[in-house]
Amino acid sequence: MDILDGIAPVAERYDGYVLDLWGVVHDGKRPYPGVPEALAELKRRGKRIVFLTNAPRRAWFVEGMLDRMGLDRALYDGIISSGEVAWRMLKAKDHPWFARLGPRAFHIGPERDLSVVEEGAAELVADAAQADFLLNTGPDPDRGSHEASAYLPALQAAARHRLPMLCVNPDRHVMVGGERLICAGALADLYKPLCGDIFEVGKPDPAVYDPVLELLGISDRKRVLAIGDSPHTDLAGAQAAGLDALWALTGLAAHAHGEDPDPEVLRQVALTEGVDPIAAVRALRW
């Protein structure tokens, strides 16, 4: 697999860019070095940029996080998050899985994720016995972000009442400031043998790319490049949506393969995941 030093060699082949956030644009605390400059150069060349993240919060919340990191809003054209898509689906109830849900949700996750149920999208209840479904947005401060097993009692309580799970972040892990933490997908894995009725919103589901392409305003999918650090979600999702993908060797990829990975090892990992990125890139930089 070819490993590029930056995105300059492929930049002119595409009109639009779909960028993962955690592990590509930033490390959970600050943008990676060179990212603002790379985005500015793409915008200078007239490219469209949309961030697509599996964050279990609405787009307005994610935008505020980027503001606090100092990332200028002029460097991108929009944000689609799994939390935004889940909120829309809860409000619309036009998808068959959502249409059968009652309004009451038993929530596992931190308070900061509650934008996903705002404006009457769902009503939170404290007792699984009173709920219609399980809303899983990931780990919370009390039980921590390192061991999914800490959530087993709550998952078992939900399973006793056969609550279908809405998982608002299919990621299993994420890198935050160099630390590998669990995400909602890790809790979904624990819930599956207890109750297999689980709906995951986010990458790699190709459906989440439709609102992204709408924001980009580009109909030809071959003119759009997706960049992500996870073969399982970012690269697989892009491929399923008919987009070219570039594998960023930051975030989870850096944790798994180190700073100077073997191109053949990367190729074998991609083959195992069933993905075929156009190349890998050491970082999102020009």
Image (cartoon, grey):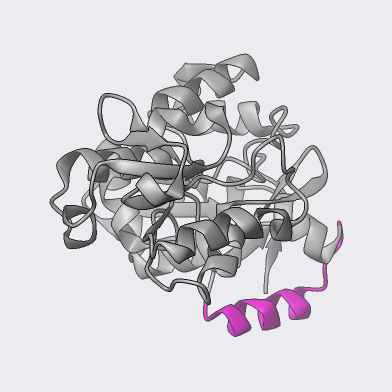
Identify the residue at image location x=74%, y=43%.
144
In front of the other: 194 or 76: 194
* Residue 261 point in image, percent of width and height: 83, 67
Q: Is residue 52 visible?
A: yes
User: Is residue 147 depicted above or below 196 in this figure?
Assistant: above
* Residue 9 point in image, percent of width and height: 59, 52
Identify the residue at image location x=52%, y=57%.
157
Is 237 within the magenta?
A: no
User: Which corner quadrant of the image does residue 273 belong to?
Assistant: bottom right
* Residue 190 point in image, percent of width and height: 60, 67
Identify the residue at image location x=53%, y=77%.
193
Q: Is residue 150 left or right of residue 19?
A: right
Q: Is residue 144 left or right of residue 217?
A: right
Boundaries of the magenta span: 259-275
User: Is residue 40 depicted above or below 22 in this figure?
Assistant: above
Magenta-drawn stretch, dominant element (helix, strand or loop): helix
User: Is residue 242 depicted above or below 8 in this figure?
Assistant: below
User: Which corner quadrant of the image does residue 33 belong to?
Assistant: top right
Count the labels in the image: 0
Q: Quadrant of the C terminus?
A: top right
In front of the other: 258 or 208: 208
Q: Is residue 172 visible?
A: no
